[in-house]
Amino acid sequence: MKMWIARDESGYLKLYQTEPQQEVSMLTGGIYWNDRLDSYKIDDRLFPEVTFENSPMEVELVIKK
């Protein structure tokens, strides 16, 4: 299953079902990623190679038995 991973300006890391686009928060003015579907917050300490500057990245989720 292909998905997307992205880190926002605040360092939050999320997994998306489709390629997210950058949006600007009306509350804070910060930039974040949104794909208009459900996103999944994952531990910010994971995947340090994923930065705001190189986000989003396409990833593949593989379920192994």
Image (tube, rainbow, N blue to C red):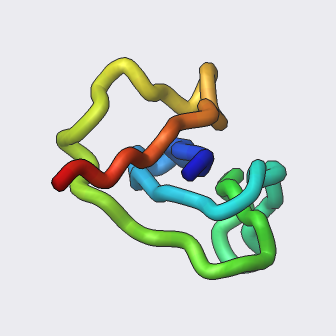
Left or right of 65 on screen, residue 35: right
- The quadrant of the rendering that contains the C terminus is bottom left
The image quadrant of residue 34 is: bottom right
Report x, y in % for residue 57: 61, 31
Note whether 51 is above or below 45 in the view shown: above
State how many labels appear: 0
Task: Tell me the residue at 74%/69% (across/down).
Answer: 25
Viewer-nearest residue: 64 or 9: 64
Left or right of 16 on screen, residue 51: left
Note whether 61 is above or below 59 in the view shown: below
Task: Tell me the residue at 77%/65% (across/down).
Answer: 35
Report x, y in % for residue 44: 27, 49
Left or right of 39 on screen, residue 56: right
Report x, y in % for residue 48: 29, 26
Task: Tell me the residue at 49%/57% (across/down).
Answer: 15
Task: Tell me the residue at 80%/60% (across/down).
Answer: 24
